[in-house]
C-alpha cells in the first residue's frame, strides 16, 4: 500500500492526523505500564513470592534498559527506517507484556520487565522522530502536545484502571491490557505511517553505543538508589561517578570517531540546547510533582489509588488546554514568550500548592493542580518542538533519543532529589511532633506512617503523619517553584535561534515525495 502523502489536501491532512492517533496509542501503552505497575506491586510481591530486592528490580529492570537503549534505539531508526523500528518496538512491547502476564517467578518477571524497557526505549524516540516527517512547523507543536498528553494520561488512568482490574481479575490482566492497545497502534502504524530514514548509512558506532548505554544506566540507577539509600551512600556515589565518567568518555569518543553515534555539533544549535535544557527542567519538576500529589491525596485526603487518580485528571485537563493553544500563541507571540508564560503558570500553581495545609479541601488542591497542568501544557510542546525543529530529518531518530535521554535524566534527578526533600522534612517534623516510640513506627515514609497509625488506632500519630507529610510536600513545591522561576528567566534571556552549526529541518512538501511505505 502506498503510504506517501501526495493525495488531495483534505485526504492528506486527515491521514496524518489519523497517523498521529496511532502514535498517541503507542505512547499511551508505554505510559500506562509504569503507573499500573505501581498499583500492582503489593499483589505481585505476594503472588510471585518476591523479596524486597526483587520488588525493587521489578521497577529498576525496566528503567535501566529504557535509559540505556534510548540513544542507540534512535540511531537504529535513522539507519534502518523509523516506521520499521516503530513496528519492531510495538511487537517487542506487546510480547514483553504477555511475558510479564504469564511469568511463573520473580526472576522471569524481572527479565520480562527488562524486555518491556527495551520496547519502550525503541518506541519513544521513533514517535518524536516521525513528527517532523508528518507535520510542518505550524502543526508540530500541537502534535507534540497530543503526544505529551498521551504520556501524561498514564498517570491518572494507570491507578484507576489497575486498581479496578486488581479487584476484578487476576494480576496478569494488568499487563495483558497493553496487548489490545499495542495491536490497535500496530495496525494504524502499518496502514497510515510513511517510512523515513537517513539517506546515508554510516558505520555502526559500537563504542558510542556501549558508552552512552552504560553511562545513562549507571547514572540513573545511582540517582534512583540515592532516593532510597541517601546521597551519602558510598555505593550510590560510586554508581553515579562511574556513570558520569562513562558519559565523559562517550563525549571524548564521539569527538574522535569518524562516524559518531551523536553529532556533538547538535549542541551548538542554540534552539536545540534551549529546548532540551528547558524541557529537562520541566521533567525534573514534573516527576517531583507526580511523586508528591498522589501521595498527598492518599495520605492526607484519605483516598485510595483510584481516588487519587481521579484527582489527577485536572492536571491532564490543564495540560490538554495548554497543548491545544500553545502553537497558536507561539505563532503570534514567539516561543520565548509562550515558554515563559507556561513557566509562570507552572510556578504559580506550585507556589499555590506549597501553601496547602492538612485542612485544605479538594477544590483548592484541584485548582493548583490544574494551573500546574496548564503551565506544563504550554511549556512542554513549545520547548520540545523548538528542539526538534533544530535537527535535520537525517538524524531525527538519534536527536530524539538524546532529547528523551536528557529529559529522563532530569526526571530521575527530580524524583530522587525532590522525594528526598519530602522524606527528610517528613522525618524531621514527625520526630518533633510525637513520641520517639510512635515516630520510629512511622518514620520510613508517610504511607507506612498511616498504616502504623491505623494499626495502633492512634489519632495523634495519624495527625502527626499528615502534618509532617504536608510540611515535606510544601518544601518540595517551594523548591520546584523557585527552579521553574529560573526556567522562566532563562526562557526569556536566551534567544533560541539556530546557529550555523544547526541543521535545518526540510520542509514537508519537499520531504514527502521521498517517503514510501
Image (cartoon, rainbow, N blue to C red):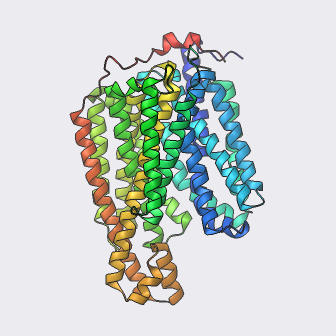
User: Is 42 displayed left or right of 218 in the figure?
Assistant: right
> Of 468 and 224, which appears nearest the observer?
224
**Measured along the vertical axis of the image, is residue 407 above or below residue 16?**
below
Residue 443 placement (x, y as % from top left): 43, 78
What is the count of numbered marks? 0
Q: Residue at x 33, y 25 (%)?
A: 268
Where's the N terminus, which quadrant? Answer: top right
Residue 407 placement (x, y as % from top left): 43, 42
State which quadrant residue 122 falls in. Answer: top right
State which quadrant residue 289 falls in. Answer: bottom left
User: Is 30 displayed left or right of 404 in the figure?
Assistant: right
State which quadrant residue 498 falls in. Answer: top left
> Of 366 and 223, which appears nearest the observer?
223
Q: Residue at x 60, y 27 (%)?
A: 76
Where's the C terminus, which quadrant? Answer: top right
Q: Is residue 159 visible?
A: yes
Q: Is residue 25 visible?
A: no
User: Is 388 displayed left or right of 211 in the figure?
Assistant: left
Residue 150 placement (x, y as % from top left): 53, 43
**Measured along the vertical axis of the image, is residue 39 above or below residue 142?**
below
Amino acid at each position: 500500500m502506498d503510504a506517501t502523502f501526495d493525495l488531495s489536501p483534505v485526504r492528506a491532512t486527515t491521514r496524518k492526523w489519523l497517523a498521529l492517533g496511532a502514535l498517541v496509542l503507542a505512547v499511551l501503552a508505554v505510559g500506562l505500564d509504569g503507573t499500573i505497575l505501581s498499583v500492582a506491586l503489593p499483589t505481585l510481591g505476594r503472588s510471585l513470592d518476591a523479596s524486597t530486592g526483587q520488588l525493587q528490580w521489578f521497577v529498576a529492570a525496566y528503567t535501566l534498559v529504557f535509559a540505556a537503549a534510548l540513544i542507540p534505539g534512535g540511531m537504529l531508526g535513522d539507519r534502518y527506517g523509523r516506521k520499521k523500528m516503530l513496528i519492531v518496538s510495538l511487537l517487542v512491547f506487546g510480547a514483553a507484556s504477555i511475558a510479564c502476564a504469564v511469568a511463573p517467578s520473580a526472576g522471569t518477571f524481572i527479565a520480562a520487565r527488562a524486555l518491556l524497557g527495551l520496547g519502550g526505549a525503541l518506541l519513544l524516540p521513533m514517535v518524536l522522530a516521525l513528527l517532523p516527517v508528518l507535520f510542518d512547523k505550524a502543526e508540530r507543536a500541537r502534535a507534540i502536545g497530543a503526544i505529551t498528553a498521551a504520556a501524561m494520561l498514564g498517570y491518572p488512568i494507570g491507578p484507576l484502571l489497575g486498581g479496578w482490574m486488581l479487584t476484578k481479575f487476576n494480576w496478569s490482566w494488568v499487563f495483558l491490557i497493553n496487548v489490545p492497545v499495542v495491536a490497535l497502534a500496530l495496525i494504524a502504524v502499518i496502514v497510515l505511517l510513511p517510512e523515513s530514514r537517513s539517506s546515508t548509512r554510516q558505520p555502526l558506532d559500537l563504542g558510542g553505543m556501549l558508552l552512552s548505554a552504560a553511562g545513562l544506566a549507571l547514572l540513573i540507577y545511582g540517582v534512583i538508589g540515592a532516593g532510597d539509600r541517601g546521597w551519602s551512600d558510598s555505593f550510590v556515589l560510586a554508581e553515579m561517578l562511574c556513570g558520569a565518567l562513562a558519559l565523559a568518555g562517550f563525549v571524548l569518543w564521539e569527538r574522535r570517531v569518524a562516524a559518531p553515534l551523536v553529532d556533538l555539533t547538535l549542541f551548538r544549535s542554540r534552539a536545540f540546547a534551549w529546548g532540551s535544557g528547558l524541557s529537562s527542567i520541566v521533567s525534573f519538576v514534573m516527576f517531583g510533582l507526580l511523586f508528591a500529589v498522589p501521595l498527598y491525596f492518599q495520605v492526607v485526603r484519605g483516598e485510595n489509588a483510584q481516588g487519587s487518580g481521579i484527582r489527577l485528571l485536572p492536571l491532564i485537563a490543564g495540560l490538554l488546554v495548554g497543548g491545544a493553544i500553545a502553537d497558536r500563541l507561539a505563532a503570534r507571540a514567539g516561543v520565548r514568550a509562550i515558554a515563559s508564560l507556561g513557566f509562570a503558570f507552572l510556578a504559580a500553581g506550585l507556589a499555590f500548592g506549597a501553601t496547602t495545609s492538612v485542612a485544605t479541601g479538594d477544590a483548592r488542591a484541584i485548582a493548583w493542580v490544574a494551573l500546574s497542568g496548564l503551565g506544563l501544557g504550554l511549556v512542554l510542546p513549545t520547548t520540545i518542538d523548538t528542539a526538534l525543529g533544530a535537527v535535520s530529518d537525517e538524524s531525527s531518530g538519534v536527536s530524539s533519543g538524546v532529547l528523551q535521554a536528557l529529559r529522563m535524566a532530569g526526571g530521575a534527578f527530580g524524583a530522587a532529589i525532590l522525594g528526598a526533600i519530602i522524606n527528610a522534612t517528613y522525618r524531621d517534623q514527625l520526630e518533633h511532633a510525637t513520641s520517639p516510640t510512635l515516630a520510629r513506627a512511622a518514620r520510613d515514609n508517610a504511607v507506612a506512617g498511616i498504616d502504623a497509625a491505623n494499626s495502633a488506632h492512634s489519632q495523634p500519630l495519624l495527625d502527626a503523619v499528615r502534618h509532617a507529610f504536608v510540611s515535606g510536600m510544601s518544601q518540595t513545591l517551594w523548591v520546584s517553584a523557585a527552579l521553574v522561576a529560573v526556567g522562566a528567566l532563562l526562557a526569556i534571556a536566551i534567544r533560541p535561534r539556530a546557529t550555523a552549526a544547526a541543521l535545518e529541518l526540510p520542509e514537508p512538501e519537499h520531504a514527502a515525495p521521498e517517503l514510501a511505505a
